[in-house]
Image (cartoon, helix red, strand yellow):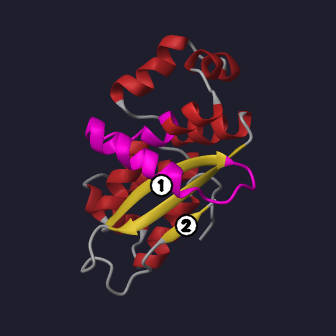
Amino acid sequence: MNLNKRLQFLESLLLATGTSKSRLAEIMGVSAQNIFVYFKRDDMKLSVAQEMASRLGFKLGFTLEKEGAPSSSATLMDIESLVNANGLSRLAFLRVAMGQYGIQRKDIAEKLGLNYTGVNRWFKVDDISISYIYRIAELYGLDVKVNLHPKSASQGIGRPKVLEFW
């Protein structure tokens, strides 16, 4: 399988679960062409990636950390507390990173050449294209770490307990 930079974690998840892209399309209720387009473009909305992982029995999470820094359990705890306090929040990891590294929404908009309203919309709809996650990380010297955890012990049988990418 051709491993793309941004969607490598999904390619690896498909390999680990023995799921083809055509089968993933069936599971997602979309055409195989839709799935192939995501992988060809090497991009999709975070919500779509999380739904794919969920339907394969995994939880998908991201963290943004300083390049070369060891993983911080405090970062993961901060994300968990944001998720628990605010309900489901796909962008909790981005909010934590912005707070930790002093990143402002207006700065992200300027550096990406986007309208400030567009960046605010990410947080309002709680979704973002995966390509923007990687672009933000690159602009601020951060590593993107992707974690896939089985949703439950029974769903994890015969599967890797945790898949990590960065």
SS label for mark 2:
strand
Is 81 contained in the magenta span? yes
Q: Tell me where residue 81 appears, x and y as whole percent.
A: 36, 45
Q: Main secondary structure of the magenta part?
A: helix
Depth check, front residue: 33 or 48? 48
Q: Residue at x 37, y 32 (%)?
A: 126
- Kindly identify the amino acid type of the residue bearing the numbered disc 2: Glu
Mark 1: few/some/many CA within 10 Å (<14, 14-19, 20+)? some
Is 75 contained in the magenta span? yes
**Quadrant of image for the C terminus:** bottom right
Per the rendering, the mark at residue 36 is 1
- Tell which circle, 1 or 2, labels the residue nearer the N-terminal end: 1
* Residues rendered magenta in the picture: 66-95
Looking at the image, residue 92 sits to the left or right of residue 107; the answer is left
What residue would you read off at disc 2? 164
SS label for mark 1:
helix
From this view, report whether residue 101 is shown above or below residue 153.
above
Q: Residue at x 57, y 45 (%)?
A: 41
From this view, report whether residue 60 is shown above or below residue 163.
above
- Kindly identify the amino acid type of the residue bearing the numbered disc 1: Phe
Q: Residue at x 64, y 34 (%)?
A: 101
